[in-house]
Image: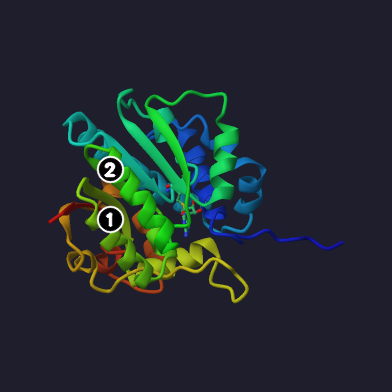
Amino acid sequence: MSITRLSVEHVSDTAILTALARAIESDRPDALFKDPFARSLAGVRGEQLVSSIPNIDSLSKAIAVRTHVIDEFILKAVSQGEIDTVLNLGSGLDTRPYRLPLPSWLRWIDCDLPGILSYKYDTLSNNHPNCTLEFISLDITDDRARRTIFQQINQSAGSVMVVSEGLLIYLKPIQVTAIAIDLREQRRFLWWLTDLSSPKGLQLTEEFLGVNRLNSQVKLEFAPEEGIEFFHNFGWRKMALRFLLDEALRLKRINLSEELLSQLPFKGQQNLRNVSRLVWLIRT
Ligand SMILES: C[S@@+](CC[C@H](N)C(=O)[O-])C[C@H]1O[C@@H](n2cnc3c(N)ncnc32)[C@H](O)[C@@H]1O
């Protein structure tokens, strides 16, 4: 009898894995957040993918910490009246419009590839978001489609916060450059929240996801050596910066550092600190 080993095959599988990680976090008695939709969104495919992830526990903790910090950033911006629109690029199975206490006047726009977006739309169709929610199907690497959509949103919004959680690492530097320039061109796009891997972080994520096989269609690409300075050239500068490792310690997902240390092909706290950063960018 042959056993088919399911693995991360398409980039949208990473959205399913992220949902699964949020489901795992939500089950904890000390959960950093409760995502009541995550388990059903991860679905059967999520359970199948777990078998291909050697260290799902560490991955879940890292994703939970990242999710929580970005929740904090978004809630802060909303409570300070800084934004009226969130543009969520590579939105995947993120359920913030349903699970966060967002005001009804907030406009939230989820953008992703058509397959994952329609799957999410169908799965959540019986639930009501707390704010206005729109779905826009977009391949973010399609220059013309991206610019058209950015311009349309810019014309109809007051002040926009862009979110690209877990997206940029799958794009080539030239594609991230084009996105950074196009975002900056929109006068009302004021803020940009993103995670940012270091080259070592990319290597580690490849190993975690098991996507460093020759036949994998999922390629990890973006982890600039220069870190946040990458964005400076395109009119974005740092407003706030959090290191995933520090946040994991703060949020008592403390074993993360020990687990990482024991598995990493490189040593040192500073390297570890840079593995992944969460950045709040502001247009200059
Ligand atoms: C790791 S998931 C993160 C999903 C979501 N931001 C979250 O945190 O739950 C990466 C997402 O990026 C999306 N993505 C990757 N390449 C894309 C592209 N070229 N255009 C649009 N979305 C893309 C995938 O479909 C997937 O949903």
Tell me where residue 283 sits by quadrant: bottom left
Residue 263 showing in the rendered view: no
Residue 221 showing in the rendered view: yes
Q: CA distance from mark 1 to mark 2?
A: 13 Å
Q: Which residue is mark 1?
A: 183
x%, y% of residue 102? 32, 27
Q: Residue at x 40, y 63 (%)?
A: 143
- Left or right of 201: which side holds 84? left
Element class at badge 1: helix
- Left or right of 18: which side holds 105? left
Q: Residue at x 43, y 29 (%)?
A: 98
Q: Which mark is residue 155?
A: 2
Q: Amino acid at mark 2?
A: Gln
Q: Residue at x 83, y 63 (%)?
A: 2
Q: Mark 1: is the Cβ under 8 angstroms from ligand 1?
A: no
Q: Nearer the viewer, residue 130 or 53?
A: 130
Q: Residue furthest bottom?
A: 214
- Left or right of 9: which side holds 133? left
